[in-house]
Amino acid sequence: MQYFAIGDEDTILGFSLAGVRGRIARNAGEATEAFREALGRPDAGIVIMTERVVAMIRAEVEAYMFSERFPLVVEIPDRTGRLAGRPGIRDLVNQAIGIKL
């Protein structure tokens, strides 16, 4: 099982230094291509996407997330920080396990 990252240049560079393959997405077209490539990879177990890239193609990502179970899609903030109105990692964990950390 492999990771696959989709995001801005800095995010992809950082993940590549850790050995994670990925694609840069600067617009909705590139984001859609990268997302479909990630889903088509038989070895992709977790697709890591920046919040800003997901915002470009939210309908497609959510349609996938609510209909498929694998690979797992994870949204992360990029180097500029979290998008307004998006929950932080601590909030997501608290919600998932029902215990405030």
Image (spheres, rainbow, N blue to C red):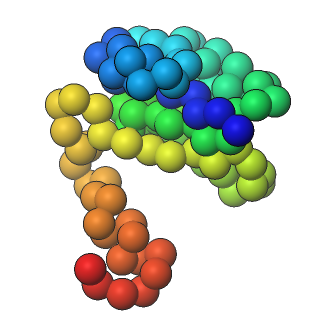
State which quarter of the image contains the N terminus.
top right
Q: Nearer the viewer, residue 23 or 3?
A: 3
Instruction: Answer with left or right where residue 43 lies relative to residue 8.
Output: right
Q: Residue at x 76, y 31 (%)?
A: 43
Residue at the bottom extreme of this rendering: 99
Please provide percent x and percent y for residue 54.
47, 35
Viewer can see residue 12 = no
Residue at the front extreme of this rendering: 18
Q: Residue at x 30, y 40 (%)?
A: 77
Instruction: Answer with left or right where residue 101 lies relative to residue 2.
Output: left
Could you tell me how many numbered marks the image carries?
0
Please provide percent x and percent y for residue 61.
60, 40
Please provide percent x and percent y for residue 94.
36, 77
Instruction: Answer with left or right where residue 99 lies relative to residue 32.
Output: left
Q: Is residue 42 above or below residue 24?
A: below
Instruction: Answer with left or right where residue 74 lies relative to residue 89.
Output: right
Viewer can see residue 2 = yes
State which quarter of the image contains the C terminus.
bottom left
- In the figure, residue 90 lies in which quadrant? bottom left
Q: Residue at x 25, y 43 (%)?
A: 83
Q: Is residue 65 above or below residue 9?
A: below
Please provide percent x and percent y for residue 25.
46, 15
Q: Nearer the viewer, residue 73 or 19?
A: 19
